[in-house]
Image (spheres, rainbow, N blue to C red):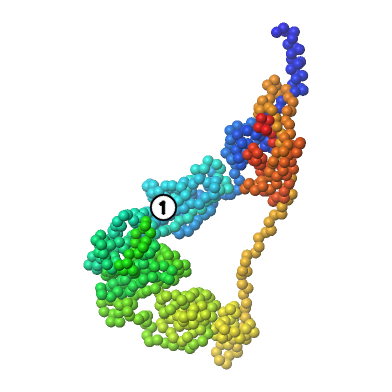
């Protein structure tokens, strides 16, 4: 090329740089322009593109590369109440049989450690369940010292052999930020479920592991606090070998003065057991039970050992030799346990029994030890009548009349703490004293029960005493505490009560009324009013791919080849996908979306035809979406 042409070439290139500007090489979802459809960040449905900042030498946004991690709300960044618990030495203690939380994963990549102290109970397992919001992927691990006991996600089950302090680690495996996410931990102590082998019957059902225990002489020894999976399958395979049905005889060592719960539960449908207890004598049962409640066929009772010794138990089918018709996949199985009354297993069994007997409210078990009249040898007989408590003496009577229940109590059929419950009497309930008194129990009648019953003396008060307490200085009794017989005593009762010796002037006293707490809390603040919101969305198309600008220089001009696109459906939606407003673009490629929204509400713009959804700022009023022309 001739040297004389170089100046002319420089002049031409300068002229082109002034008149042909480049098309934007980068697009974004900001007020002026949005990323072109087809870029990775825009084609991810429901995704939120990362914020873009201009570089030091260019006022346009930074180029979009690979898809960044979706952003999350920046709420709940404060640590939870157990922090700091980022190391085993800082483990936060958790209660048993409770739900704890909420807990957060703050800061990011945080690991939370918790401590559990598990008591020793051979038939109770521990179930740990973690419930988290959708943005967390939690992994659980339990260690006892340096030994890994269990590991998994969502839920862990610790065997009864795991006793003492253990450390629970909760780790989040989700790579996204955890701001705004939380979780709770539920720890439950449950009775060990039956093994699967005992639930499925083979072609020839096998007897349980304690057979052959068909008599007192062959009674199988069992332990207190253990759960046994038993059945009524005859141990002898010969036809009609058990004409009266399979009877299971068991023997268990007991301690004097300890109260025991003897129960059958988890019955196969159709199984109806009867439990009988024998103490010394083998010809007559001390006590027995067939059906614990009217809603089920399980048998359960309580019994207190008079001496150290061996208690014999007989469990027999209620239908005798009649073989019950059961489902094909099950056997005539049941579960059996003897638990000390103060043990954790006894409390769990009591709840299980009430549930399976359709008795949701706590009730006393229906039987108790009845000592023999002779009192010799510690023997007892089930045919004896109820015994008056020690020290009660002969039956007494008091004046009958109206009375008031002072605290919630149970009306029982007999004057014993373990007698069958007739009804629950709430505080302030009116009753009528009948007259008989036995020990610390008073016989009363109540509208809550058709039968008369007994309540403890500390739970009842004469109606006249209630009236006097209402007039005592510094106290106030609601009128609902007054019985029907004292309805005439109103708020106009005397203001002076004789409090000194006879002949001394009476001290004036006034009734003091204490204001009750409001029944309902104060109403919360009114919700924020909705504000009108309008967004103008413009959809345009171009035949230039992203980043196809000129290469002659920064000042080289280029024509704007974008064309408006009409008849495109555009929707304004909430973060939950609810459509708030929608419309079609006009010939200019623009549509106005209007809706009243709450201040600060998160909004998105969706174009269903292309499966794209873009977030918009609360104060944003315009949005331009550029798409490739070949997609039209």
Which residue occupies 32% across, 67% down?
322
Q: Which residue is mark 1?
A: 157
Which residue is more in the foreground, 251 or 511? 251
Q: Is residue 50 above or below residue 432?
A: above
Asked if residue 622 lies left or right of residue 435, the reply is right
Q: In this view of the protein, which residue sits in the foreground, 176 or 59?
A: 176
Where is 31 relative to 259, above or below?
A: above
> Is residue 280 left or right of 138 when viewed as pictured?
left
Q: Position of residue 253 (x, y in %)?
A: 28, 67
Q: Is residue 577 above or below residue 403?
A: above
Of 359 and 386, nearer the camera is: 359
Q: Where is residue 476 shown, x and y percent of the image?
A: 59, 78
* Residue 506 sits in quarter: bottom right
Q: Is residue 72 left or right of residue 90?
A: right
Q: Residue furthest top?
A: 2
Residue 268 at x, y = what percent? 38, 61
Spot the residue most to the left. Answer: 217
**10 Å crowding of disc 1: few (<14), some (14-19), many (20+):** some
- Residue 553's quadrant in the figure? top right
- Residue at (55, 89) in percent of width and height: 501
Residue lying farthest to the front in this orientation: 239
Q: Position of residue 284 (x, y in %)?
A: 28, 75
Q: Quadrant of the C terminus?
A: top right
Left/right placement of residue 613 relative to residue 368 reads: right
Q: Does any portion of residue 621 appear in the rendered image?
A: no
* Residue 260: quarter of image: bottom left
* Quadrant containing the N terminus in the rendered view: top right
């Amino acid at each position: 090329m001739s040297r004389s042409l170089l100046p002319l070439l420089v002049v031409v290139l300068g002229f082109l740089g002034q008149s042909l500007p480049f098309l934007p090489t980068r697009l974004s979802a900001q007020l002026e322009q949005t990323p072109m459809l087809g870029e990775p960040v825009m084609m991810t449905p429901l995704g939120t593109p990362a914020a873009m900042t201009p570089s030091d030498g260019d006022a346009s946004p930074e180029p979009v590369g690979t898809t960044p991690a979706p952003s999350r709300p920046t709420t709940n960044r404060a640590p939870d109440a157990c922090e700091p618990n980022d190391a085993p030495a800082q483990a936060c203690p958790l209660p048993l049989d409770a739900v704890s939380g909420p807990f957060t994963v703050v800061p990011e990549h945080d690991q939370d450690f918790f401590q559990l102290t598990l008591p020793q109970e051979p038939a109770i397992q521990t179930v740990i369940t973690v419930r988290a919001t959708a943005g967390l992927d939690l992994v659980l691990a339990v260690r006892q010292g340096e030994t890994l006991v269990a590991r998994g996600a969502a839920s862990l089950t610790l065997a009864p052999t795991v006793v003492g302090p253990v450390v629970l680690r909760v780790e989040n495996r989700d790579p996204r930020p955890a701001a705004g996410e939380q979780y709770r931990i539920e720890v439950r102590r449950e009775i060990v479920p039956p093994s699967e082998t005992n639930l499925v019957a083979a072609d020839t059902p096998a007897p349980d592991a304690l057979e052959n225990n068909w008599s007192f002489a062959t009674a199988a020894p069992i332990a207190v606090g253990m759960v046994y999976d038993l059945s009524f399958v005859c141990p002898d395979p010969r036809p009609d070998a058990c004409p009266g049905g399979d009877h299971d005889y068991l023997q268990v060592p007991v301690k004097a003065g300890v109260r025991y719960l003897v129960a059958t539960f988890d019955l196969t449908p159709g199984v109806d057991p009867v439990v009988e207890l024998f103490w010394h004598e083998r010809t007559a049962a001390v006590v027995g039970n067939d059906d614990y409640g009217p809603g089920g066929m399980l048998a359960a009772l309580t019994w207190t050992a008079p001496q150290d010794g061996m208690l014999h138990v007989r469990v027999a089918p209620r239908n005798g030799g009649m073989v019950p018709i059961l489902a094909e996949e099950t056997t005539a199985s049941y579960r059996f346990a003897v638990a000390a009354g103060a043990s954790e297993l006894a409390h769990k069994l009591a709840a299980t029994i009430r549930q399976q007997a359709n008795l949701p409210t706590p009730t006393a078990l229906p039987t108790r030890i009845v000592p023999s009249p002779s009192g010799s040898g510690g023997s007892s007989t089930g045919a004896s009548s109820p015994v008056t408590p020690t020290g009660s003496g002969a039956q007494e009577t008091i004046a009958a009349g109206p009375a008031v229940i002072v605290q919630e109590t149970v009306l029982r059929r007999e004057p014993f703490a373990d007698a069958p419950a007739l009804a629950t009497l709430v505080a302030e309930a009116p009753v009528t004293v009948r007259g008989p008194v036995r020990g610390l129990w008073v016989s009363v009648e109540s509208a809550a029960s058709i039968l008369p019953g007994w309540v403890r003396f500390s739970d009842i008060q004469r109606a006249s005493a209630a009236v006097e307490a209402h007039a005592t200085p510094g106290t106030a009794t609601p009128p609902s505490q007054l019985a029907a017989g004292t309805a005439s005593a109103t708020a106009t009762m005397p203001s002076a009560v004789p409090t000194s010796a006879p002949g001394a002037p009476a001290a004036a006293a006034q009734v003091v009324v204490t204001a009750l707490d409001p029944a309902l809390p104060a109403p919360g603040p009114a919700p924020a009013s909705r504000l009108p919101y309008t967004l103008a969305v413009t959809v345009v198309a171009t035949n230039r791919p992203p980043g196809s600008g000129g290469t002659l220089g920064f000042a080289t001009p280029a024509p704007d080849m974008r064309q408006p696109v009409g008849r495109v459906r555009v929707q304004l939606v909430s973060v939950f996908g609810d459509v708030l407003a929608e419309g079609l673009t006009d010939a200019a490629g623009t549509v106005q979306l209007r809706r009243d929204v709450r201040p600060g509400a998160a909004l998105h713009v969706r174009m269903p035809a292309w499966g794209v959804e873009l977030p918009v700022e609360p104060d944003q009023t315009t949005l331009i979406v550029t798409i490739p022309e070949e997609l039209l």
